[in-house]
């Protein structure tokens, strides 16, 4: 054991280098492995995120179809079968969205009204008379009302199975449609299988209401519910692009339905598998990731699994070869380091034996001399009679730039004190060469050099170039001077107070304009100069802040200077010394009289403008650049049914809705057109205003931009008037023209 330990001690450099190198190689290989795994995982996550985003984008397209139908049916909830068919046929929905299987409308029907309802539907022979010939609702369990699927587009052998379905009794749709009706939200159903076809589909459905209050309750939503519009979506068509891309990247996938994602969903359901790729996952998956897909009120989860190994066989061979080469190189380097270490040890031992301690001291003296010779300070050594016996390189460069040696000279370099009989050290500063503006600023130290018995044997002079620090000092002094001058010329004034809130310094400011000396305030407190237009309670509050040694900002009071009364705004900050003791306040003050007078004038002008708007006979609504309501006058409030307090901040389209007089279809928002299209003004048009309480008014409306002094658009104004009493006259004029 002793021999083994001695062997390791002798060759510890070899084993240390070898061990450290092996650790570095192992760490490098581990880092490479983690980087490759991380890169593969990042690639998998990026592919999953992109495909999930594209899937959500395709789902949004289906939602837009549903939203459009919801809006159309909300305006005309009594849309018959012919109108429903023409609406979808004209919009070309099935061609633009191949993933749609069918679009349908379901209406709630009471049990007592079921016979009359079935007879009315069968009597309509205009569209698909054969499928509707035996139209009937499926049997009902219990007393709950029916939600019968009445309108359907297109009608074919695959979709006609939906006609007459009671959606309220469907296990896959009942609970979700109840939530949609009670919350007013669009929801997605679970994935279902058709009776005559094994293709998986799911539904997007949205409720339709009539005359719904602004903030309805659940009972009001159920009362005003008149139907539900649905779209049936083919799941295979939705997932086909994703499946093709994932197969190209050798990825398998599984789609899970995690159920409804609403707080009102009372039953917790585990995720169920909906579909998977043709390639089985098994244990061959090297990496996996999960990505969520959000539907209205529902979440899907896509699990992706990579079927490619992270490490290929070729990469393994290269890494093994690199590791072997690195290990062999490491052994060679460790052996070389051990040889160099042993060679150095042998050389040092031989050198110490040959030269001894005296040579070592000479070596140290040489090192010291070299340090002195290369010093950045100039060093000069004289004999007592003034003869220069040593000058380092910096002294030679400064005082003999023409390469004349200083040794042996008696010349004065900087001061006569160099040649004096010194008993104590002396220091001084000077500019060298004298009179040269681009010369150096030097700090000089002259001191005697004594022997062992303290007799002076030489005079040493050390010279240091402090030009840079001296220039900084001059710049700092000039900056302080400029700051003092700026403080004196500033329109603000600066002040300091002691611990008793008495002024100790007042400088600058506007005192010269009032012919008041700042020294007038010294020794006085702020409240000693008058009440300042403040109550005793306000002064007590200010003194409480001072007692707590808290900072304050924009404290305003009035002050009488000369014959004028001004409004002063002051801000202060507590000051503490190095020991943390409170020493007083320091702050700034300014004259804000002109600002306060301007604010008062502006408020008066705004009040006059508001009084004018409230007195005219037209309705006026102003918005900001985003179309949010900023102001509504009383006439407009009475027509739209909204008060200013509840309408302010709302989008204009929420409180103001106008439709065409003949077709009753929504008209474009005038304010939105003016702001979006860059127009200055939109001419007058006649329309029908639908107010908050369901009343209709014939109105004339126009819109224009609002600009500030720099002609920048800051909003828009909508002006409209009630012309309901003019309608008969207009009709008579039209008849006369015809």
Image (cartoon, rainbow, N blue to C red):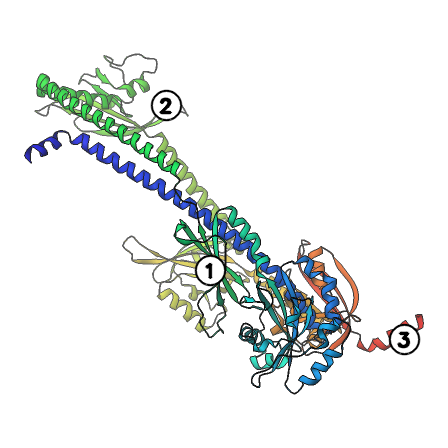
Q: How many numbered marks have been drawn onto this rendered protein structure?
A: 3
Residue 613 vs 709, above or below: the answer is below
Which residue corresponds to the image point at 32% horizontal and 41% vertical from the top-left?
Answer: 30
Question: Is 456 left or right of 563, judged from the image as shown?
Answer: left
Q: Which residue is tagged 3? A: 732
Residue 185 vs 585, above or below: the answer is below
Q: Tell me where residue 722 sits by quadrant.
A: bottom right
Task: Nearest to the eye among marks 1 and 2: give it.
Answer: 1
Residue 182 rendering spot, x and y as whole percentages: 56, 76
Tell which circle, 1 or 2, labels the residue nearer the N-terminal end: 2
Tell which circle, 3 or 2, labels the residue nearer the N-terminal end: 2
Q: Which residue is tagged 1? A: 570
Pointers 3 and 2 in contact (CB under 8 A)? no
Which SS class for mark 2? loop
Question: Is 236 left or right of 359, judged from the image as shown?
Answer: right
Query: How many residues crowd around disc 3 within 10 Å: few (fewer than 14), some, or many (20 or more)?
Result: few
- The residue closer to the viewer here, 348 or 204, is 204
Q: Quadrant of the C terminus?
A: bottom right
Residue found at the very far bottom of the displayed protein? 112
Disc 1 from disc 2: Cα separation: 51 Å
- The residue closer to the viewer here, 98 or 261, is 98
């Amino acid at each position: 054991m002793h021999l083994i330990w001695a062997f390791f001690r002798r060759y510890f450099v070899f084993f240390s280098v070898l061990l450290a190198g092996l650790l570095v190689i192992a760490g490098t290989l581990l880092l490479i492995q983690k980087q490759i795994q991380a890169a593969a995982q990042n690639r998998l996550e990026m592919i999953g995120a992109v495909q999930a985003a594209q899937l959500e984008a395709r789902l949004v397209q289906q939602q837009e179809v549903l939203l459009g139908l919801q809006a159309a049916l909300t305006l005309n909830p009594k849309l018959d079968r012919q109108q429903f068919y023409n609406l979808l046929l004209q919009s070309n929905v099935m061609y633009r969205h191949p993933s749609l299987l069918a679009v349908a409308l379901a209406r709630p029907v009471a049990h007592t009204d079921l016979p009359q309802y079935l007879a009315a539907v069968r009597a309509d022979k205009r569209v698909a008379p054969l499928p509707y010939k035996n139209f009937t609702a499926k049997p009902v369990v219990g007393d709950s009302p029916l939600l019968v699927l009445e309108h359907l587009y297109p009608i074919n052998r695959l979709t006609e199975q939906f006609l007459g379905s009671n959606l309220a009794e469907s296990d896959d749709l009942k609970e979700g449609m109840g939530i949609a009706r009670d919350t007013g939200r669009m929801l997605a159903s679970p994935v279902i299988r058709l009776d005559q076809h094994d293709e998986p589909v799911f539904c997007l459905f949205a409720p339709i209401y009539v005359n719904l209050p602004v903030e309805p309750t659940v009972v009001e939503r159920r009362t005003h519910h008149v139907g539900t519009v649905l779209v049936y979506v083919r799941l295979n068509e939705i997932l086909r692009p994703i499946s093709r891309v994932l197969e190209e990247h050798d990825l398998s996938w599984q789609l899970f339905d995690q159920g409804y994602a609403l707080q009102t969903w009372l039953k917790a359901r585990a995720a169920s598998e909906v579909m998977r790729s043709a390639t089985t996952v098994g244990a061959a998956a090297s990496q996996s990731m999960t990505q969520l897909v959000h539907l209205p009120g529902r979440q899907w989860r896509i699990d992706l699994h990579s079927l490619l190994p992270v490490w290929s066989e070729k990469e393994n061979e290269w890494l093994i070869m690199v590791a072997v080469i690195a290990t062999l190189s490491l052994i060679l380097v460790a052996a070389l380091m051990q040889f160099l270490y042993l060679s150095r040890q042998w050389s040092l031992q031989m050198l110490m034996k040959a030269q001894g301690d005296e040579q070592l001291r000479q070596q140290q003296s040489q090192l010291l001399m070299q340090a002195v010779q290369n010093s950045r300070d100039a060093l000069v050594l004289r004999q007592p009679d003034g003869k220069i016996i040593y000058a380092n390189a910096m002294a030679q460069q400064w005082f003999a730039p023409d390469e004349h040696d200083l040794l042996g000279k008696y010349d004065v370099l900087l001061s006569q004190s160099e040649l004096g009989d010194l008993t104590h050290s002396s220091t001084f500063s000077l500019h060298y060469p004298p009179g040269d503006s681009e010369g150096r600023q030097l700090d000089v130290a002259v001191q005697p050099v004594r022997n062992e018995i303290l007799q002076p044997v030489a005079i040493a002079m050390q010279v240091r170039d402090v030009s840079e620090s001296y220039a900084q000092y001059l710049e700092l002094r000039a900056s302080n001077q400029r700051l003092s001058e700026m403080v004196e010329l500033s329109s603000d004034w600066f002040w300091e107070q002691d611990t008793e809130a008495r002024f100790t310094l007042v400088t600058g400011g506007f005192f010269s304009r009032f012919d008041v000396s700042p020294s007038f305030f010294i020794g006085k407190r702020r409240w000693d100069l008058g009440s300042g237009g403040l109550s005793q309670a306000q002064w007590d509050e200010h003194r409480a802040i001072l007692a707590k040694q808290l900072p304050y900002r924009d404290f305003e009071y009035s002050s009488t200077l000369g014959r004028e009364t001004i409004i002063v705004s002051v801000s202060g900050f507590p000051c503490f010394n190095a020991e943390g003791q409170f020493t007083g306040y320091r702050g700034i003050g300014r004259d804000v009289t002109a600002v306060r007078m301007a604010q008062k004038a502006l408020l008066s002008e705004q009040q006059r403008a508001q009084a004018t708007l409230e007195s005219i006979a037209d309705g006026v609504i102003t918005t900001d650049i985003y179309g949010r309501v900023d102001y509504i006058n009383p006439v407009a409030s009475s027509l739209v049914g909204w008060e200013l307090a509840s309408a302010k901040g709302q989008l204009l389209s929420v409180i103001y809705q106008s439709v065409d007089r003949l077709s009753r279809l929504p008209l474009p928002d005038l304010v939105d057109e003016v702001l979006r299209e860059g127009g200055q003004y939109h001419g007058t048009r006649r329309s029908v205003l639908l107010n908050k309480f369901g009343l209709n008014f014939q109105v004339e409306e126009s819109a224009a931009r609002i600009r500030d002094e720099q002609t920048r658009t800051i909003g828009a104004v909508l002006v409209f008037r009630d012309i309901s009493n003019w309608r008969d006259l207009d009709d008579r004029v039209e008849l006369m023209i015809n």
